[in-house]
Image: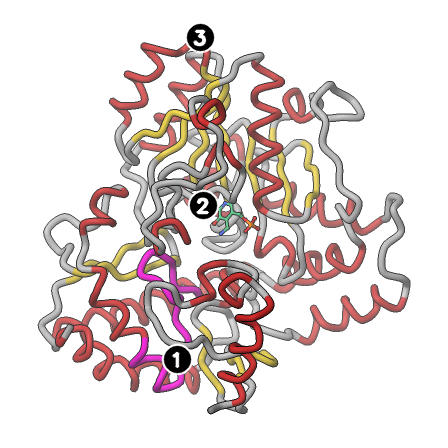
Amino acid sequence: MTRSEELFNRALKLMPGGVNSPVRAFGSVGGTPPVMVSASGPYLTDADGRDYVDLVCSWGPAIVGHAHPAVLEAVHAAVDRGLSFGASTPAEAELAELVMGRVAAVERLRMVSTGTEATMTAVRLARGFTGRNLVIKFAGCYHGHLDGLLASAGSGLATLALPGSAGVTEATAAETLVLPYNDLAAVEEAFAKHGQDIAAVITEAAPANMGVVTPAEGFNAGLSRITSEHGALLIFDEVLTGFRTGYAGYWGLTGGAAQSTAPFTPDLMTFGKVIGGGLPVAALGGRAEVMDYLAPVGPVYQAGTLSGNPIAMAAGIATLTAATPDVYAQIDAASLELSAAVSSALDAAGVDHSIQRAGNLFSVAFGTSEHGVRNYEDAQGQQAYRYAPFFHSMLNDGVYLPPSVFEAWFLSAAHDTRAMDKVYAALPAAAEAAAAA
Ligand code: PMP
């Protein structure tokens, strides 16, 4: 038995499924997950000393690579000043300024610790601001594990083939309308029926939790138009895309880098992952008029003992500072090159597939070449069974992919030629394994 297997078997007795977040458990790909003990640049190292090229990057945060020297230095310096003060610190404002300097739609920001908290607060704020109850979400979009948004939620629920979660009351579920993604007509129809009662539409800026799905031309702008016509808010969830798909996130890619040229402006946005560079930071931000409904200024309550924690702020500041426009250009190019290599390996093995892309995020879907994946129905209809043998072949050759076909692949600025060559060398065998499935 390997050391990893010993450690995972111990964990199985101590934690449900041996994990603290379900997709880490290899539920849909099978096998025992390697237990990781360190990470550096583009590599993860497991308990047996095996190195893997990491294409998960902590599910997004490690955009400048693991253990980046400037990030570690900032964190060490913050640690030396004390761990948590329960009072305001200069670093909170510094990180907020960095975010606002990049995303002009954010006029006020509130730091929280997880993406779930950010979206949960955004939904409560939208309800408090509008005085309405209903929220529209799209099937296959994941916004964290708040009760109201777990229906048809993608991510781990897609991996485990769950329609929603036990423990969510019918009354809560009834306040969420779930619509097909990329279907503006369905949104128009829902507003025609329930417009007076809809507080918000929440959407991933580009879905990446049912695999990656490209928002159809004008879809996001259409949501903005429809919500504003009906006095509802648009919550643009950039927890995954923010500061990853570009300097100003996915909104920036759609022309939103400068508000004056933006084709649309979300009322609220949520951030996570990259904003904390690997420590627990997330945030919600948006129009000052809406954000000022939050306590202590307004009547919508939200709080957090560790919100704006100084160590976490230091990691976020150092990460955003290191993530220069050059970093995004490099990741964009690496993503194009890698996805093309994946595609040609699959072509060579005769595996029907589509590369699903939104900016530098991509995923692979199987048996979907006809029209790609446009929504959750397409995602669920794919030949998902081809992914497990593909994944394990790559893992065997030292490449750590997301352990589910419904997740995006993540690159970092640290993925150099040596790391990428290891990935390219592993692809042909993995494609053959997918073909044989
Ligand atoms: N929104 C999106 C788009 C996400 O991808 C995620 C996490 N994958 C969340 C919200 C929830 O974030 P967290 O896991 O930090 O609660």
User: In the rendered structure, are the residues bearing label 2 and label 1 in contact, judged by CB atoms less than 8 Å apart?
Assistant: no
Amino acid type assigned to the residue bearing label 1 in the image? Val
Amino acid type assigned to the residue bearing label 3 in the image? Gln
For numbered disc 2, what is the local secondary structure?
helix
Instruction: Residue at 70% x, 43% y: name it.
Output: 111
What residue sits right under mark 2 in the picture?
Answer: 250
- Residues packed near mark 2 inside 10 Å, few (<14), some (14 to 19) or many (20 plus): many
The tag on residue 196 is 3
Q: What separation in Å lies between label 3 and label 2 (alpha carbons)?
A: 29 Å
Q: Relative to 87, is 334 above or below?
A: below
The tag on residue 86 is none
For numbered disc 1, what is the local secondary structure?
strand
Instruction: Residue at 60% x, 68% y: name it.
Output: 14
Q: What separation in Å lies between label 3 and label 1 (alpha carbons)?
A: 50 Å
Q: What separation in Å lies between label 2 and label 1 (alpha carbons)?
A: 27 Å
The tag on residue 399 is 1
Residue at the farthest front position: 13
For numbered disc 3, what is the local secondary structure?
helix
Q: Relative to 410, is 261 above or below?
A: above
